[in-house]
Structure formats: structure tokens, C-alpha cells
Amino acid sequence: MGGVTSSVAAKFAFFPPSPSSYKLVYDELTGLLLMNPFPHRENVEILKLPTRRGTEIVTMYVRHPMATSTLLYSHGNAADLGQMYELFIELSIHLKVNLMGYDYSGYGQSTGKPSEHHTYADIEAAYKCLEETYGAKQEDVILYGQSVGSGPTLDLAARLPHLRAVVLHSPILSGLRVMYPVKKTYWFDIFKNIDKIPLVNCPVLVIHGTCDEVVDCSHGKQLWELSKEKYEPLWLEGGNHCDLEHYPEYIKHLKKFITTVERSLSSRASTAQSEKQSSDLEMPRQSVDRREKPRQSVDRREKEKPPKGPSKKSKLRITFEQHLDRTRRSVDFHEKARKSVDHHQHHQNHHQIERGRKSVDRLDRVRSDVFAADAPSASPKKSPSPTATPTKAPTAPTKAPAAPTKAPAAAPKSSSASSPKASSPAAEGPVSEDDYSASSPSDSAEAPTVSSPPAPTPDSTSAADGPSDGPTAESPKSGAVTTAKLSVVGTIAAVGFFLFSF
């Protein structure tokens, strides 16, 4: 029942020109399709596109070298590409856009029969050609629908959320409302634009003549009120259904609208880029201070997604802290090594100084021991002891009787004179070199010579010389021995000091 109703409505809605205003000619030299009787243009291409409903439509693409937008034009009820050819060229030049127009199925040289669903398939084929053949993006496409063409235009616009803009030229609320001003939409109605306009998410421009006799101006006004993003509409005073292109306000207002949406798109792109950068900057930063906890992310997806393991930032932070710990340990190790080397060097220098001091002290001890050992042995030789004098004194009376009376007197003087000198080394301890030289054997030998009385007889002379010959004979030998010992000890001490210093 719905298909029959649509076909019946199509008979009243579509009035394709008959015959067609143009013919397609295939150029064998260039391999291009040409529209006869129109001359070939370098910036115009004629294509035949298949649709998903099995028909084949004819499209016309006009290229502009400075264009940043592409206009997909759906023409009115009683027109084809031959009638729209010159208008498409002018719109492309004045608006500086690329423009594609197409004939519905059953219009012009397109195959099939016109119907509502065929028009939906036709505009989808044209839009697909823009994307695949000419590289147009959804954000660069402006959909333009005139009269019945507002039906497929709003149907596609409701399914494309990122379109640049939509232009509605003398649009209709629905097919049934053109004939009857009904308050609700019926199931057999066609082109239900009144229900699709709220789904369009881009700026919408509505152009309508106030004196339109085919589609009342109230259709355009109601569609503009129902649109989400309203742009300043153009209500042309005295304009009819098919002559709005001849008004100067038409091309002026249309050009202003396209310039505005192009600028707004660039501003929106920059705003989106800045928001993306700000969102990247507002990611939760990890705190450097360990006492402060890192702020939680505001992104819900991050909260819902359980962490699988440590993040890259935490790994980098752990690696950096480990590196710092290793650096500190290496510095401490070098400090300890430096301290140990300094301590060893200081200990070695101190040990060498102590060894030098010990060698000097040992030399002094050796010298003092040598002097202490030599002093007692030399003191008996300095002065004859009292026991030695009586052993030689009794021999004198055998030869001269008068000698014993004087000999004992001489013995006590020599013993008394030499006793202090003999006892002084033992009482005073070690004797220095000066003391030892002062109490030399030569001085002690002179004392018995001075104290001995002159003997007139040869025997008395020999007896008196007996005790004095001993010290005088031993004095040079003891001095030489002492000197030799001192030289040997000094040499040993010097060699020891030299060895201990190294």
C-alpha cells in the first residue's frame, strides 16, 4: 500500500522535462562525455554514476581553482542539467566553490523512473563520487536543495553530522503539505522534511520568495524555526518559485553565508586544536613532593580502565631514582676511598717520621751506652788504686831502708788525690764526651809523677818510675780504642738512620 501511495504521489510531485534539454556525446579523441549543445570546458566534467537501486544518473562537476568548499546541488521538480548548466557555471565563479549537480533517476539522460527513494539513492551516489573521485571531505561539503530537491538534501544531511552547511531554496515541509495544510505527518506522505530538519547539526540557510505560488513561504519559515543552527534567512519580497536567482540579494546573501561558514569552520578547527592541546596539558601531573599525592584524572575512561602495571612515567621515575641512588653510592664510595687513601698516606708519613725519630733516639742511646761502658774501665787507669801502691812499695825497703818511711806517705796522697776522680763517674752516671776528654789518662798520669819524691839512687828511681810507667804506657791505647769504637758506632748509627728513613 505504501509503494502504491508513493508512486501516486510521485506522479503529482515529479515533472521531468520532456524531451530532455541535452544529449550526451562521447568524444573518441579525448574519451570524455560531452553535453550537447554546450561547448566543452576544461573545468567541467560529465560523468555517469550507478546507484544502489540499479539506475544510472548523469552528474556535472564544475571545478574552481580557488575553492575551499564543494556545493552539491539538488535541482527542482521541472528542471534538468541542461537547464541548470549556465547557473552552475555562474554559481561556481561567484561563490568560488566546486559544484556538482545531478539529474534524478528518470530526469534528463538518467535511467529509471523518478521516485522518493530513487532520489535518496541518487544523492548518495553523487556524494560518494565527491569523496572517492574528487577527494572532498564531509566538512567541506555544502548541500543545496531547491524545491523537491530539499527532500534528498535533508535526508542526507540528517545522516551526515559533520557537514559544513545546508542551503534550502524554496523548500517544502512535506509532499502532502504542499497540497493540503495538514497538522500531522501521515504514513503515506513523501519527503517528510518537517521531521528531518531537527536532526541536522550544521548551519542552515533558508531562501524563500514571499510571493511563491507553488510552495508557500510558510514552509520555509517553519523549517527555519525548527532548525538547530539558524542562519539569517533571506525572504525575497515579490519572489516567486523559480525566479529567485535573478535577484541581486540572492547571490550577495548566499556568498556572505558561504564566507561565514568557511570562517567559522576554520575557527572551530583552531578551537578544537587548542582544546586538544589544553586537554593534553591538563593531564594529571605526578607530584615531585612525595608527601603530596598526585591528582586524580578527570577522564572517566581512565578511571574505568584498570591499570595493568606501572606506567611509563612511573618506570622512568623509578629508573631516575635508582640512578640517583647509584650516583650517591658511587660518590660515597669515592669519598670513603679518598679518606682511606688520605688516612693511609697520613699514617705512612707519620710512621716514617716516627721511624726517623726512633732512629735518632736509638743513636743517642747507643752513644750514651758506649760512654757509660768506657767510663768505668778508664777510671782505674787515670790514678793508681791504694792497693796497687803497697804491692810495689815493699820492694823498695829491700834495696833502700829509708825509702819505706817516705813511700807510704806518698801512696796516700796519690790515692787521696785520685779517689774523687775515680768515684765521680760511678756516682754521676753516663759521662759525656767533654767530661771524658777532661779526665783523660794523660792528666791522671801526671799526678803520680808530681807527687813521687826524687830518688837519689838508681833503685829508688826505678821503683818510683814503676808505678808511673803503667798509666803513661796505657793512655794512648785506651784513647785509640775509644775513638775507634765511637767511629764504628757513628757509622752504624748513620747507616741505620739512612735505612729507617726510607
Image (tube, grey):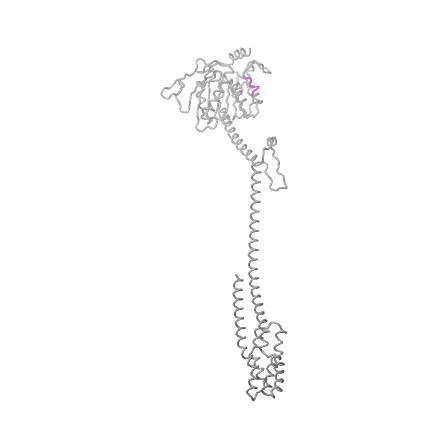
Observer-nearest of 400 and 266:
400
- The residue positioned 52% from the left and 65% from the top of the image is 495
Q: Position of residue 482 (x, y in %)?
A: 54, 73
Observer-nearest of 133 and 202:
133
Q: Quadrant of residue 276?
A: top right
Spot the residue most to the left. Answer: 29
Q: Is residue 488 visible?
A: yes
- In the image, residue 282 sits, relative to residue 132, either above or below, namely below
- In the image, residue 68 sits, relative to residue 409, either above or below, namely above
Observer-nearest of 235 and 87:
87
Q: Position of residue 148 (x, y in %)?
A: 51, 17
Determine if the magenta segment contains residue 385: no
Position of the N terminus, as image quadrant, is top right
Q: Quadrant of residue 405?
A: bottom right
- In the image, residue 497 sits, relative to residue 111, either above or below, namely below
Chief SS of the magenta region: helix
| Magenta segment | 191-196
Observer-nearest of 374 and 52:
374
